[in-house]
Image (spheres, coloured by chain):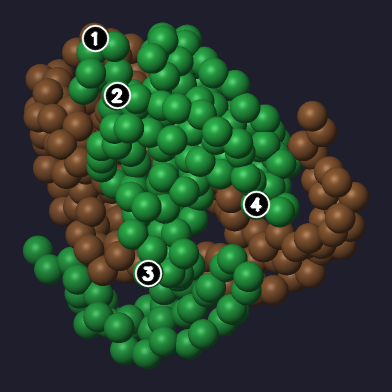
Chain colours: A green, B brown
Amino acid sequence: MELTEKTLSSEKIFDGRILHIRRDTVLLPNGHQSTREVVDHPGGVGILALDDQNRVLIVSQFRYPYGEILREIPAGKLEYGEDPAEAARRELREETGAVAGSFQSLGELYPSPGYCGEIIRMYLAQDLSFGDTDPDEDEFLGLERVPFSHLVEQVLSGEIKDAKTIAAVLKVKLLLGL
Amino acid sequence: MELTEKTLSSEKIFDGRILHIRRDTVLLPNGHQSTREVVDHPGGVGILALDDQNRVLIVSQFRYPYGEILREIPAGKLEYGEDPAEAARRELREETGAVAGSFQSLGELYPSPGYCGEIIRMYLAQDLSFGDTDPDEDEFLGLERVPFSHLVEQVLSGEIKDAKTIAAVLKVKLLLGL
């Protein structure tokens, strides 16, 4: 079965500080036309940083679209053209002060594929040493260290809702058998 | 530490078929002002449907923002005001033809909390019976039944990238011990 849609034309809708929106006209597999509204995104990174006592660095941050403080693994947006692994090291240091001796990929996450092209690369960071944090100017963060087994419970109970945090925690649980 | 941001004003940017964008001016915890660009979203549902041979219903769909065919659990957007559990039953039937005798919550997923207020409610559907599919007019889907253990491997290897699918599969793996 043919599933592919072909772009016929593209119209820029909004070029904001964070969001970049376009509306494309597409040819559907059945020959009809439709429109697709797309959020373009440079991609992001999320870092599950595990200290030598199997505790995870968790940041608390007010997430404006929800009007809630969420608990998440450290994360951030790529600069356009930035190497994802470099961005992950930068975000981890800025948000938590941690520098990791060991960094490995936990795969990619497509958060909301219906309307956004964002790819979040997830990493496991270990062998941590700590310096000063350096958060972005308009970023206000709380920081805690949560025992890995407690975090797994908080994910399974539904207390942790952030997609990249759920994915990274449960992947590490099953891949490392922690 | 105070983390909350207060809305000072809100400007509508785009009211599309799918996307609704606003730009708010906010008061930060340090008394400064900033802007927040937000995608408003009615919320969605994702359904991990497990048949009596422990196979999962997986749909293949061209996801225009990525230009890729993704393999995902059945999912869809809420109509504004629609009950999420009803929406989940509707989407499951429309996309796969399945009707579930047993439906239970797998919690909520916040896919991209930096800029979007979408909440995806995830469900485990079991005790399945099958009728006809009824996809949306501009929706073209492939359908397969994947043994649950294979799907777990595909999630852990990084082959499955969709956030709600990763979260639902690994939660079921750990909650049901499958």
Give the label on residue A81, or none: 3
Q: Secondary structure at mark 2?
A: helix
Residue kind at label 3, given as amino acid type: Gly
* Chain designation of label 4: A
* Quarter assignment of residue B148: top left
Residue kind at label 1, given as amino acid type: Gly
Pick whichever of labels 2 and 3 is earlier in the sequence.
3
- The tally of labels here is 4
Out of B68 and B51, give the one closest to the viewer: B68
Q: Secondary structure at mark 3?
A: loop
- Percent position of residue B155, x then y: 21, 35
Residue at 29%, 53% in the rendered image:
B134
Q: Secondary structure at mark 1?
A: loop
- Percent position of residue B51, x then y: 18, 24
Which residue does the numbered mark 4 point to in the structure image?
A136
Q: CA distance from mark 3 to mark 1?
A: 41 Å
Which residue does the numbered mark 1 point to in the structure image?
B177
CB-based contact (under 8 Å), mark 3 and mark 1 = no
Q: CA distance from mark 2 to mark 3?
A: 28 Å
Out of A78 and B58, give the one closest to the viewer: A78
> Vertically, is A108 above or below B100?
below
Q: Are marks 2 and 3 on the same chain?
A: yes
CB-based contact (under 8 Å), mark 1 and mark 2 = no
